Amino acid sequence: MSTMPAVIFDLDGTLVDSEPLYYEAGRRTLERYGVTGFSWEEHTQFIGIGTRETLETLRERYGIEAPVAELLAVKNRHYLELAATTEIFPEMRAFVERLRAAGHPLVVASGSSRSAIETALKATGLDALLPVYVSAEDVGRGKPEPDVFLAAARLLAVGPGQCVVIEDAGPGVEAARRAGMRCIAVPYAGGPSPDGELFASAGLLFRGGQPEFDARRAYEWVTSGS
């Protein structure tokens, strides 16, 4: 077993800039069921929340009769149509490459579907660096519950105390805390303020988000055991 800290990456908004794509997929999905005018501002309420939980809330909010499983399939299809344009945050790629070169166990833990994760990783070339992942389909509860991070630790055969989570959203930071894991927070620029209490438990917070994120500083923090 490796004694080096394992690093668990959230995907959307952390590794890749996919939130605009998820917004558009959600907008198209709601429009299909007669709900128009879904705004980016409304979408930001769900940044960090799994796709299933998001659709459960929207289904109830707008009185959509279709079952959640159908909504999931429709949104996933729309997202996959858009996902080929996914872009990785450059400094985050540098961070992943540094961790991999040093031999840290790495895994992606996301509230998205397996197909969405695979498509985003392949589109950005991250699939070669991060071949192991856990999806929302593999666990019972989404963030802020710790299930997906605990499943990721089990997959790597390491204890929660040996893991560092990289997150962009409050619910994910809270999930890391509940899992007993250290956390680096890189708040998504278009999301809620990092001043919220959910971000308070992050051990290292890049308050300015991706423009402020520094791969070297993050790596030093991971290996320092702070």
Image (cartoon, rainbow, N blue to C red):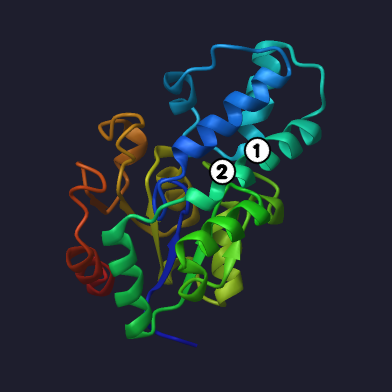
Residue at the image point whose x is 64% and y is 33% from the top: 53
Q: Callout 1 environment at 10 Å: few (<14), some (14 to 19), or many (20+)? A: some
Q: Is residue 160 above or below residue 37?
A: below
Q: In the drawing, does residue 54 fall left or right of residue 214? A: right
Q: In the drawing, does residue 170 fall left or right of residue 120? A: left
Find residue 82 and name its label: 2
Q: In the drawing, does residue 117 fall left or right of residue 176? A: right
Q: Secondary structure at mark 2?
A: helix
Which residue is tagged 1?
A: 78
Residue at the image point whose x is 37% and y is 45% from the top: 168
Q: Amino acid at mark 1?
A: His
Q: Is residue 225 above or below residue 178?
A: below
Q: Is residue 69 above or below residue 14?
A: above
Q: Quadrant of the C terminus?
A: bottom left
Task: Compare residues 210 and 158 and report the one nearer the observer.
Answer: 210
Q: In the drawing, does residue 138 fall left or right of residue 163? A: right
Q: Amino acid at mark 2?
A: Leu
Q: Is residue 142 visible?
A: no
Task: Compare residues 119 and 103 and report the one nearer the observer.
Answer: 119
In the image, residue 175 lies at what x, y percent? 48, 47
Residues at badges 1 and 2 in contact (C-beta under 8 Å)? yes
Q: Is residue 174 above or below residue 157?
A: above
Task: Compare residues 101 and 196 and report the one nearer the observer.
Answer: 101
In the image, residue 66 lies at what x, y percent? 82, 23
